[in-house]
Image (tube, grey):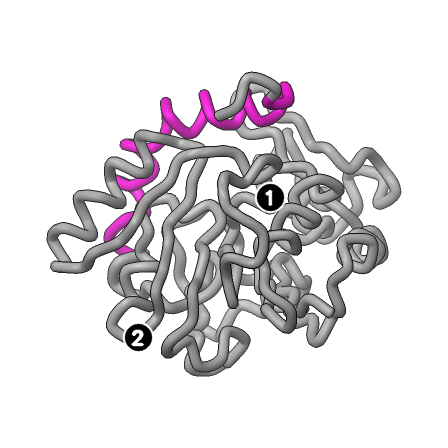
Amino acid sequence: MTADASEHERHNRAFWDDDADAYQAAHGHALRAAPAAWGVWRIPESELGVLGDVKGLDVLELGCGAAQWSIALVPLGARVTGFDQSVVQLAHAASDAHDAGVGLPLVAGGAEHLPFADRSFDLVFCDHGALSFADPAVALPEAARVLRAGGRLVFCHATRWAYVTYSEAKRRTTNRLQHSYFGPRLWEEDDGTHDFVLRTDEWLRALRRAGLVVDDLVELQAPKGAQTTYEWDARWARRWPGEQIWVAHKA
């Protein structure tokens, strides 16, 4: 991470370096079992089709963690680079890639200062990755910079509804607003990550300012009988759009 990294970048890197082992112990098996799938409910890419055909594409996973997604895309013919701010997460990625027999370049750094040349990739994507933990006003232009003309950005993140309905006292999402929908865009947890939680209109404007054209927005609903290793309430997520996927391309 560069010397001019922002406070939230430094905080989030320290958090993930400290938490990576516990995170992979809790969620790694489920992520490896359904790698090409989206969000906490692991909705298959084969159902959503938001990435499209990746054969022959230069692909960047922006905030790859242990790179379960990246490892799954290599056999499909993609040339994938895994990128993450946490060196401990990347150590898990290197181990998993080795076990899978997959050659996978892994790069450490922050999404607000991508160490890649202009127009390096055909596809940049993340699943609850770097675009949740980096300032979109900075990270989206960086993602656009490293995309080739016509290249696509696809990312999944938690919506504002998952935050503004969350009750600290009950430690779960509820069916009532607990916070203002028009509150701050940076959600700072004392014992967790510092998350950027934008409204949908803010995401739309940020994407347009970065020179990206929105092609689709998919609001995810928990499937019937869904289970997850994360602390999400499936009944709540059947009623509320707790996650969404943006699909955009560089004009």
In the depicted structure, whether residue 58 falls above or below residue 175:
below
Confirm whether residue 193 shows in the render.
Answer: yes
Q: Is residue 105 left or right of residue 247?
A: left
Residue drawn where x is 69% and y is 32% of the image: 187
Residue type, mark 2 in image: Gly
Q: Is residue 56 left or right of residue 138?
A: left
- Looking at the image, how many numbered discs can be counted on the residues? 2
Residue drawn where x is 29% and y is 41% of the image: 24
**193, 172: nearer the viewer:** 193
Residue type, mark 1 in image: Ser
Label 1 crowding class (10 Å Cα cut-off): few <14, some 14-19, many 20+?
Answer: many
**219, 61: nearer the viewer:** 61
**13, 244: nearer the viewer:** 13
Confirm whether residue 174 shows in the render.
Answer: no
Residue 77: image tag: 2
Of the image marks 1 and 2, the number of the one nearer the N terminus: 2
Element carrying mark 2:
loop
The C terminus - image quarter: bottom right
Q: Is residue 8 magenta?
A: yes
- In this rendering, which labeled residue sits more in front, label 1 or label 2? 2
- The x, y position of residue 35, in whole percent, is 33, 63
Residue that protrudes farthest toward the right in the picture: 182
Magenta-colored span? 5-30
The residues tagged by marks 1 and 2 sit, at their Cα atoms, a distance apart of 28 Å
Label 2 crowding class (10 Å Cα cut-off): few <14, some 14-19, many 20+?
Answer: some
- The x, y position of residue 128, in whole percent, is 52, 50
Q: Is residue 249 left or right of residue 54?
A: right
Majority secondary structure in the magenta region: helix
Location of mark 1 (residue): 132
